[in-house]
Amino acid sequence: MSSSASFNMPTASLAAMLREVQVFMNSIQRPRLKDSAWVQATLDRCQELQELIGSTRAAVANRGQGVSESMEEFLEYLKVWMHEFRERPKASRMKKVTEQLSFRYEAMVQSARTWKETASNFHDHVEHIKPMNYARSIFHVGMGVSAVLLAEVFLT
């Protein structure tokens, strides 16, 4: 195997792992703690992600120390999140732990983007947890324009 082919394998697995984690992170932003099927599926997904992150971390460990460290931090917080999740905490406590996990995810994405500058074939289409909601933005612009028009027409 050529050195460029072995270099591409970790970058491809890193991008795939980040996409999987992003899907998971989006799914836990609004937990359905009373839905036992969702809870069990989420716990199962956590176990799968731990294995996926562990194998990806091993693949990039000698090439991307910062990425490897951020993956380790994310894994630690994922374990904390799972522990809290199993305890069925109040929504406010779950939100706090989810925010901490989200922060670690964003740090992992940022370290991967920094590392990609040295990795030639890193396909970077990993999104942030809360992507831009264009419909909401258009609604707010429309409401702003409507308010200005109403003020000009009725208050002058």
Image (cartoon, grey):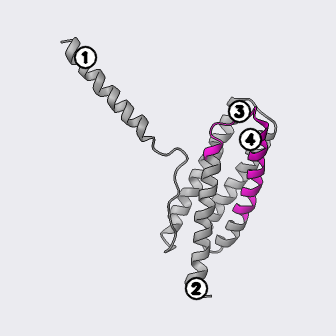
Whether residue 59 sits left or right of residue 83 in the image: it is left
Q: Between tags 4 and 1, which lies in front?
A: 4
Q: Which residue, given by chain and number where applicable, does mark 4 sit on? A: 38
Mark 4 vs 3, N-terminal side:
4
- Secondary structure of the residue carrying tag 2 is helix
- Secondary structure of the residue carrying tag 3 is helix
Q: Which residue, given by chain and number where applicable, does mark 2 sit on? A: 3
The answer to whether mark 1 and mark 3 are in CB contact below 8 A is no
Q: Amino acid at mark 4?
A: Trp
The answer to whether mark 3 and mark 2 are in CB contact below 8 A is no
Q: CA distance from mark 4 to mark 3?
A: 19 Å
Q: CA distance from mark 4 to mark 2?
A: 43 Å
Q: Which residue, given by chain and number where applicable, does mark 1 sit on? A: 151
Task: Quadrant for residue 75, please give it.
Answer: bottom right
Mark 3 vs 2, N-terminal side:
2
- Secondary structure of the residue carrying tag 1 is helix
Q: Amino acid at mark 3?
A: Arg
The answer to whether one can see residue 44 in this image is yes
Residue 87 inside the magenta-drawn segment: no
Residue at the (62%, 88%) spot, across then down: 1
Main SS category, magenta section: helix
Q: Which mark is residue 93?
A: 3
Residue 37 inside the magenta-drawn segment: yes
Q: Quadrant of the C terminus?
A: top left
Q: Between tags 4 and 3, which lies in front?
A: 4
